[in-house]
Image (cartoon, rainbow, N blue to C red):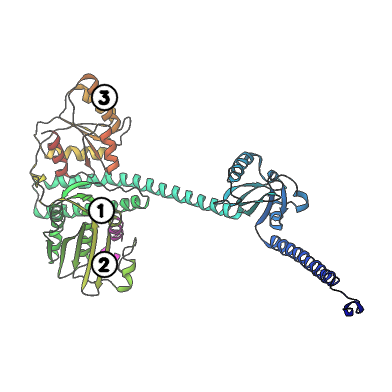
Amino acid sequence: MGVDGDNGTSDLHRPRSGGRKRTFGLRRAQSARAGLIDRTEDILTSILNLAAEGVIVTDGELRILVFSGGAETIFGYAANEIIGRSIEVLIPEGYRVRHREHVARFKQNAATSLRMRGRLQTMGVSKSGATIPIEVDLSRLTAPRGEIITAIVRDVTERAEAERSLAAAADRAQAASQAKSAFLAAMGHEIRTPLNGVLGMAQVMATDDLPPRQRERLAVIRESGESLLQILNDLLDLSKIEAGKLTLEEAEFDLEDLLRSTHAAFSALASQKGLTYRLTISERAKGLYRSDPLRLRQILHNLISNAIKFTAEGGIEVSVGRRENRLLLEVTDTGMGIPPDRLPQLFDKFEQADSSTTRRFGGTGLGLAICRDLAGLMGGQISVTSRMGQGSTFRVEIPMLRVRRERARTPAPAAAIRPESDLSILVAEDNPTNQIVLRALLEAAGLDPVIVSDGAAAMEAWQSRSWDLILMDVQMPVMDGPTAAAAIRAIEAAEDRPRTPILAVTANAMAHQIDEYASAGMDGVVAKPIQLEALLTAIAEFTD
């Protein structure tokens, strides 16, 4: 019983010895933790100083607690200069109210930990007073010792300058595009005036009794003028497409009538070259449609024209079908074919099958590019397959709404329409060439017009007597056509006078322009260069 006591130890002393060991272990653990904390602080400091972004930590009162090396670089302050100061020292005066409101909204959320959704684009101010475009991410943490707000700041000066440069370049490109469009529109107007003279007089002379040789020469003049007009129209259409200003119209039309008239326009040319020339329309495709007949005709016109141009022997076949709600057009020729390496570029502007094509066949290389763009505007597409020496097939698919299956009533041919010769017609046209052309065209139909040179003179002549019809140019000095038409309509309403039909005679006949003329009180449009049949048809329609 006394052994333990003789050894100088007892059960009562052992716990004390164990407690000392645990105390020593605790101290060692605390020392290790302290070292780890110091080490962690070193690591965080290293990370903060390496980060290109600025890291700024504030308390709930927005006093700066941490200011990283990246923040020093962005704002120009040393950390010991800025710690303890309000964050607003880094915000330009004009941005501070907005910043307070933004932070207040951010702090309203009751979540203990919160990260801002989206980045704040704002301005900072450096120690030197220079403003800096910055991008900020915010996070908030509510800890036992209080609220902590952390901001990750990026200097986006270079990006802002790049964006400004891009915006300036875009503005310059837009201005250049507008200048080009304005130039082409002005040139188009100027070129159309002499073309109107050439084509108008050719039509008038064609009504005379001419020797066969003179009639053949006259046909060459008219065909050449119409080719020049087609080139001009292609250039203007391309300019409108590039500027996003080409708008599609919507009208009901009979597809078979459109196809047969477009096909017939090339019959003589195909016959001259000794080519077979067929049109096939499936029963599924026939009927009345609602779309833009002008642009559909333009696509088909360009494809048939190209096929005949590049086919020396054999023939051309135009076939039209329908699948679900899509119209399918195919123009197949037995021409020279297209080299495979040229197919990918074929629909690019100013591109043709090879460098000798323009010399051999002429053309601008715009027709297929316009077909592609028009088909795209209409929601469709165009493609081509070809074999050298065997020919090519162009396929167009366009979604198109069919209104009904039966054909529309075919109107009487325009050439058969002739207005009464005793009509009183007032013409307002400032260009002397166009005045001569209009007089000659109307006199060829047995009409004797009165011609004045501007809208103000037209109003004066209109007030002096009654008229069956007014043909009104749009762009005129003193008073333009729409202004004169609106003034005439106002007087008619005020004085309860009968309405005089007014037709705009202009080269500017796009859908939005026609709407403007209608708003001014005009009843219809005759497009320049003037086609005699279209002019007489319009006169007959509004004087019936």
Task: Classify the position of the N terminus by image quarter.
Answer: bottom right
Quarter holding the C terminus?
top left
Element class at badge 1? helix
In this rendering, would 231 be left or right of 125? left
Extent of the magenta region: 357-373
Between 98 and 42, the residue placed more toward the observer is 42
Q: Nearer the viewer, mark 3 or mark 1?
A: 3
Circles 2 and 3: CB atoms closer than 8 Å? no
How packed is label 1: few (under 14 Cα within 10 Å), some, or many (20 or more)? some
Q: Which residue is mark 1?
A: 230
Among the 4 quarters of the image, the one containing residue 425:
top left
**Residue 304 shows up from this direction:** no
Q: Secondary structure at mark 2?
A: strand
Instruction: Tell me the distance, in whole angstroms, between the alpha carbons under discs 1 and 2.
Output: 23 Å
Q: Give the residue type that dot 1 points to.
A: Gln
Q: Secondary structure at mark 3?
A: helix
Q: Can you give x and y, in whole percent of width and height, for residue 292 in the image?
A: 23, 49
**Crowd around label 3: few <14 · some 14–19 · many ≥20 (10 Å):** some
Q: Earlier in the sequence, mark 2 or mark 3?
A: 2
Residue bearing the label numbered 3: 490
Labelled disc at residue 384: 2
Residue 193 picture quarter = top left
Above or below, 289 against 471 in this view is below
Give the left or right position of residue 89, taking residue 178 as reference.
Answer: right
